[in-house]
Amino acid sequence: MAVKTAGIGIWELDIKQNKDFWDDKLFAMYGLSKDSSIACPKTWHKSIHPEDLPKQLELMEKAQKNNLPYNTQFRVIWPNNSIHHIKSSGVIVRDASGMPERMIGANQDITIYNQAEETLRLANLEMERALRTKDEFLSTMSHELRTPLNAILGISESLEEQIAGELNQKQIKYVRVINESGHHLLELINDILDLSKIEADKMELNIQPVLVQKLCESSLRMIKELAQKKSLNVSFKLDKNVTIILGDERRLKQSLVNLLGNAVKFTPQGKKIGLEVNGNEQTNKVTFTVWDEGIGINQEDAKLLFKPFVQLNASLAREFSGTGLGLALVAQMIRLHGGHVDLTSELKVGSRFIISLPWRAATQSGQTISPVQNLKDNPSQPADQPKLPHDKHAVKILVVDDTEVAAQLISDYLQHKGYKTEIAHNGSQAVLLAKQEHPHIILMDVMMPVMNGLDATKQIRADPSLKDITIIGLTALAMPNDRQNCIEAGMNDHLSKPIQLPDLIKVIERYLSPQPGL
C-alpha cells in the first residue's frame, strides 16, 4: 500500500533470459498500456530518451559486473511526446554460483519535483537579477544625487571662507543657510540610501568595542545647540556597570542622535528630555532610554511609527518637518545589532523610546579599546602611506573629476591653501598627466566617462615610476564595497562625496605629516 501511495513502480529484470517484468504502476509511469505493450528490454529502450540511453545501459552493465547498486535518473518519452523524469534504483540478485541472476528495482516519476526545482531556480535567478538591478539603481541614484550636492556644499564652504573675495555679513548669512540646507538634504539622501541598503541586505556593520559614555556624550553634543534654542533641560544618567558594548559606533550614534533629535523636536519650550543607560546582568541586555516631556503618541499611531515614510498626521506634518524615515532606520539599525526598539507614550505627557541591545557584564572587566579598534573614529585611514614633501608649497596635486565645476572648485580651494594643482576630466587624461607631471597626490573621481577612476588607477600603478603617488578616491556612490574596490584598484584612501573641503585638507595633511615607521 505504501508503495502504491508513493507512486512507485516495481520492475524485475531476468538477466539470463533478458526479460523484463513490470507492475501496472510502471506501465502507467511510462505512459503505456499493459494490454498494448509487452514488457521487455526493447520497450524500455524505446521509451527512454535517446540522449540518456547510452549512459543508462552503461550503468546497468557496471552494476551487473561489479555488484554495484543501480541508482540513476533519466528521461522517458511518452507516446504523446511529453517528457517525464524518472528516478530508478535497483539491486543485483545472484545465483548459488555467484553469477548475476536477477535485478530488482523501483522507479518513481519525479517530473513534478524537477519542475518545482526549475521553477525555484528561475525564481532565484529573477531575484538575483532584481537585487542586481536595485543595487545598480542605488549606486546610480547615490551618484546622481551626491554629485550636485558636492558642488553646492563645496561652493558654499568656499564662499564662507571668502576664497573668491570678501562678503558682507548678509551674504555670509545667506551662504550659511545654503550650506545648512545642503547638509540637511544630504542627511535625507543618506537616510533613503541607508534604508535601501538595509532592505537590499547591503548594510555592513563595523562591530567593535564601544565606550558607552563616549557614545552617549558625543550623541548629546549633537543636539545640544537645538535643545538650548528651546531652553530644554537635558539630563543624562549612566549605569556605572555599563562601560563597553559591542557594536558599530557610528550606527549606534546615528540611532541615538535620531531619537534625541525627535525628543527635541516634539518637546515644547522649557520642558525636559533625557538619556538613561542601564545594564541587566540577568538578561544580558543593556537599554538606552530616550525620554521626553513632549506631545506624546497615541496607541494607534505608535503601531505605524517604525514604518518608512510614515508621519503621524497631516497637522503634525505641517508643524514638524521630516520624511518619516528616521525611526524606521533606528529600528532596522538596532535589529542588525541583534536588538529591538520599544516605545511607551502618553498624549500630552511624553514618550520613552527604549533601545535594547545584547550585553555581557562579565566581559567588561579589563577590556580596553586599542588604537586599531578606534579606526572607526576616523574612517578614512590610509591603506598605505608613501613619503611626501613636508612643505605644502612643493606638493603638486592632480584633481580628476568629470564635473568641471567640482574639479575647478577643488583646484581653487587647494591653490588657496598653498598647493599646486592640475586638472583632468577623465581617467585617460589622468593617466597621461600622471606620467607627464608626476604629481605627489591624485584626487581620483571613480565614476567618469572614457575611463573610470578604478581603471585609471590600475594603469598608473602599472607604471613603476608612478608607484609612489598617493591616490585618494573620490566617489559619489557611497555603497558598502566602494572603499574596498578603491583599495583593491591600488588607491591609498577613499572619501565619499559630498566632500567637505576642510576635511579634504585634513586627509591630505595626514599624508604630508611624517608617519611612524616611514
Image: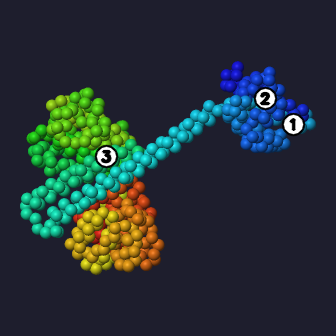
How far is disc 3 from disc 2 in space, using C-alphas? 63 Å
The residue singled out by tag 3 in the image is 192
Report if residue 496 is visible in the image. Answer: yes
The quarter of the image holding the N terminus is top right
The residue singled out by tag 1 in the image is 100
- The picture places residue 174, in percent across and down from the top left corner, at 12, 57
Question: Do the numbered discs 3 and 2 sit on residues whose CB atoms are within 8 Å?
Answer: no
* 411 displayed left or right of 481: left
User: Label 1 amino acid?
Assistant: Pro
Asked which colour scheme the image uses, the reply is rainbow
Mark linked to residue 11: 2
| Labels 1 and 2: the sequence-earlier one | 2
User: Label 3 amino acid?
Assistant: Ile
User: Label 2 amino acid?
Assistant: Trp
Q: Quadrant of residue 380?
A: bottom left
* 277 displayed left or right of 477: left
